[in-house]
Structures are given as structure tokens and as C-alpha cells.
Amino acid sequence: MNLIASLQKEILEQWRTSRLLVLLIVLGVFGMASPLMASFMPQLIGLVPGGEQFAGLIPTPEIKDAIDQYIKNIGQFAVLLAIFLSMGAMVQEKERGTAVMMLCKPLGRGSFLLAKFLALAFSFFVSLTAAGMLGFWYTAFLFKAPQVGAWISLNLLIWIYCLVYVAITLLASTLVRSQAAAAGISFGVLLLLAIVGSLPGLGQYLPGQLVTWGAGLFINPANPSWIAFGVSVGIIAACLLTAWLVFRRQEL
């Protein structure tokens, strides 16, 4: 079995186990709901007991509010899903013994690991595309159409940002023997990067800057963050390489 066949098997398994469907639904709902939340925020505040006095203080929602709400919701939930959907990628295969069966096809351990990553990358690409289309349509309907190029670039940058945590969690799932431990390591890295990113001058070099770059495309397209992009790609490559070096020495 080669890499292509293994990748097809992984994508089919993600569909059969409903992981791809869940990802599509969750990100699609938030893509659709974000401009709705931005548009109806004054009314929502007014429904809260005692909130009537504050509803009138909220400025009239604009397209920027819809984009900001989209970035906030999709950016946060996509990363959480990246961790939850990746934490058992390697652990479950080793626990159930299916890794041994797959590697007897024969299939190289590097191809086995890479197929896992590419299948998850495909699932997030499809789901973010769906979320982006819904978010774009509802934003255009409620406000006005965002800049198409900037919108596509924003979603691609969010995709790369998610893949950083897919790779980190995949490495953690290779290193440890439980899904909870893999998730714990990934959340620890997420928290660490958030803390380091809050320090003056350091945040611009970390993966989180990709989301900031995406948001800035609607304001100042001439201010890219290629260093953060390079660091993100480097983290992905380093995690996959380390996971392969560890996995090739593990007894199954």
C-alpha cells in the first residue's frame, strides 16, 4: 500500500467515523452564525434582563464587526477541534493493533504518519472552505461582500494556523500512550505559545500572528507576516519529522 492508498483510507475513515461530518457542521455553523451574531448583537443584549439600557450604547454593527466575529469564532474553535480530532490519531492505531496490520501491507512508517496528517489537513481545508463560503454569503447579505481575495487569504491563514496544532497533537499522540495525555500536551503548548505571544516583540514571530495577519488584510494588505508563516511551516515540519523519528523506533 502506497501513500495515496493510505491517504484515501484515512479520509474514508474520517467520514465513516463522522469526524469529518462533525468538523463540517461545527465550523459551518460558526461561519454562518458569526455575521448573524454581529448583526443582531444590540437586539441580543436587549433581551437580557436590564440590558435595554446598554443596547442603545452599542454602535450600529458594521462589516468589520462581522469579520472580527468570524475570526474570533473560527480561529478558536478550529484550533480546539484540531487538538480533539488529532489526539487519538496515533494512540488509537497502536492501542487497537491496526498500526501493525497497516505496516505489514507493506507501508512505510513515514507514509503511515504523513497520511494521517494529510487526511486531517484535507478535512480542515474542506470544513474551512464551507465555513468561509457561509460566512462570506451571510456577511454579504447582512452587510456587504468582503474583499474576495482578502477573505480567501484569511481562511487559508487560519488553515495553516490549525495545521500547526494538528502537527503538534500528532507528535504528542506518537509520544504518549493515551489520548488524554496527547490532548494535555497540546493544550499546554497552546497555552505556552499564548503566554509567549503576549510578550512584547515576540508575538509577531509565532503562529497566532497568522490570524492577526488575516484580519489585517482588510485594513492594510501591505503588512504581511512572512516570518510567522515561516515559523509555522517550520513547526509543522519539525513536529512531523520528530514524530517519524520516534515512531520508526517504537515497538508495536
Image: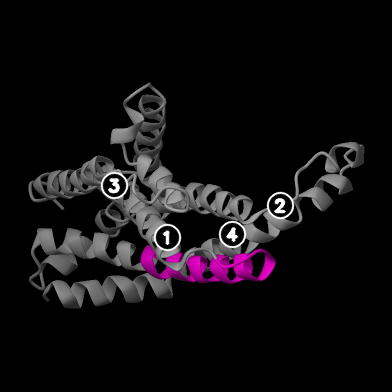
Q: Earlier in the sequence, mark 4 or mark 1?
A: 4
Please name the residue shown 23% across and 72% down the image.
7
Q: Earlier in the sequence, mark 4 or mark 3?
A: 4
Disc number lying in front (4 or 2): 2
Is residue 140 magenta-colored? yes
Q: Are marks 3 and 2 in contact (CB under 8 Å)?
A: no
Q: Position of residue 211 (x, y in %)?
A: 41, 46
Farthest residue, direction top: 200
The coloring applied to the image is: one colour
Please state which of residues 180 and 157 is positioned toward the viewer in this rendering: 157
Q: Which mark is residue 61?
A: 2
Left-right relation of 18 to 164? right
The residue to which callout 3 is attached is 173
Q: In whole angstroms, how far apart are the C-alphas of marks 3 and 1?
A: 35 Å
Please name the residue shown 36% across and 60% down the image.
156
Number of residues whose C-alpha sits closer than 10 Å to that of mark 1, classed few (under 14), some (14–19) or many (20 or more): some
Specify the amino acid type for callout 2: Pro
Disc 1 secondary structure class: helix
Number of residues whose C-alpha sits closer than 10 Å to that of mark 3, classed few (under 14), some (14–19) or many (20 or more): many
Q: Which mark is residue 150?
A: 1
The residue to which callout 4 is attached is 30
Number of residues whose C-alpha sits closer than 10 Å to that of mark 4, classed few (under 14), some (14–19) or many (20 or more): many
Q: In whole angstroms, how far apart are the C-alphas of marks 1 and 2?
A: 20 Å
Specify the amino acid type for callout 4: Phe
Left-right relation of 71 to 210? right
Residue 98 can be seen, yes or no: no
Q: Are marks 4 and 1 in contact (CB under 8 Å)?
A: no
Range covered by the magenta-colored residues: 124-145
In the image, residue 5 sits, relative to residue 176, either above or below, namely below
Disc number lying in front (3 or 2): 2
Is residue 224 magenta-colored? no
Specify the amino acid type for callout 1: Ala
